[in-house]
Image (cartoon, rainbow, N blue to C red):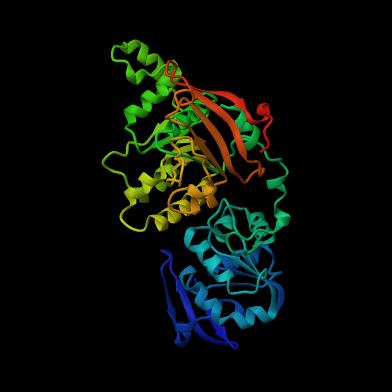
Amino acid sequence: MVAPFFVNNKLVAQKLRFQDKTFVILGEGRKELGLWGKHLWTTGKKIVITEGELDCLSVAQVQSCKWPTVSLPNGAPSARKVLEREMEWLDTNFEEIILFFDNDEPGQKAATDCAQLFSPGKAKIARMSQYKDANEALMAGQGADIINAIWKATPYRPDGIINAEDTWELVKTPYHHDALYPWQGVNDITSGARLGEIVTLCAGSGIGKSQICREISYHWMNEGKKIGYIALEESVKRTAYGFMSLAASRPLHLEENIVEEELNVYWTNTCGSGNLFLYDHWGSLDGSSLGNKIRYLARGCGVQWFVLDHVSILVSGIGDGDERRMIDNLMTNLRSLVEELNVGMLLVSHLKRPEGRTHEEGGRTTLGQLRGSAAIGQLSDIVIGVERDQQDDSAKDVSTVRVLKNRFSGDTGVACDLRYSHETGRMTEEVSVFERGEEV
């Protein structure tokens, strides 16, 4: 194939394309070639720009040369540089610029890059889902696909910019919970849990944060939901025994003589269910790779609910530095990850020691006590505090659950009390805020 290039109706270069798809360019004008086919057109409503000459001819053939069609001289790599030189001609003479580049990563990247050269809304990107380029579609006898791609070309918008007219499919389904917590009082205030949210659970040391996380996860597992459980303060064996104990309704890790057959029954109902994925981090904790592990679990294993227990130890595994800054970065990354994967995340955070009554003595939790960085509170959708007086013999097994932040509905306040049973190893709800008649 020979593709001649003209400037002011004068032949300045020729592009010779061979059967093995290699090519050479002859002529004095070969160093700064413009758009191939430009000399055939003056003005029009729209112009289609393809990557190569064969694609250009294919588009021209299926639409009987109704619209101006040109191509890049050297494919996607030089696309932006060529269009920068042709900007004045394109912008002055045409209302729409249709970028019909190859449907591969280099082609689509070049199309996005070139679309930014033009005023907003002027450049549109045409795509075909089945074929790599226009010539391939034509050779397959699917010229109609080429026409459809041109007419359905969408105006370029930077990532994140959405025309509200395009949101109907998004909003026509009302908000709903994707999972419920095991305690009615928490559901009353939070309206349940939703994918795409970060819920942070905070409490003092030894209050029972891990037990609460296991109770929630076990409840969701029994509903058929897949859980990614990342417990950084305990071994995989201890986590497994924690879930098995919930199934047995007794703390199995305190028993020395339990028979293997009985253990297998509880294991089958929890770890052996296929709905629980654990992270063996000992000796290899690397916070920077956590995102890849979560992506793998979400995309490869179908996990939609994650528990990360807890923030401080993860930050300590990232390296030395300013804890506040590292938590800021971690929370920003987790927020993006939850949105990207549309998963729910239950995050555990320690609290700063308050002045006066400590959390271990039943001191009230507040957002301002979240450790290290305000980003934890700011980037969480819901924050739940847990309080318990470990020194009061009459109340040391009762934890108060308090919703400190609720971006979904705005409701906050005491949700319920949870009583821990040493015999069953379970936490059961005693009373919800609405049964108490308290204001939230």
Q: Position of residue 267 (x, y in %)?
A: 39, 19
Q: Residue at x 47, y 51 (%)?
A: 331
From this viewpoint, which residue is outermost toward the front?
A: 356
Residue drawn at the location 71% of the way across and 41% of the way down: 173
Q: Could you tell whether 423 is left or right of 179 in the image?
A: left
* Residue in the foreground of this view, choosing between 224 and 203: 203
The quadrant holding residue 97 is bottom right
Image quadrant in which the C terminus is located? top right
* Count of labels in the image: 0
17 or 101: which is nearer to us? 101
- The image shows residue 345, relative to residue 187, as above or below, that is below
Looking at the image, residue 188 sits to the left or right of residue 203; the answer is right
Q: Is residue 313 visible?
A: yes
Q: Residue furthest left?
A: 283
Q: Residue at x 37, y 29 (%)?
A: 239
Q: Nearer the viewer, residue 341 or 435?
A: 435
Residue 177 picture quarter: top right
Q: Position of residue 274 (x, y in %)?
A: 44, 26
Rendering coords of residue 124 (x, y %): 64, 65
x, y percentage for residue 163? 69, 59
Does residue 42 appear anywhere in the picture?
Answer: no
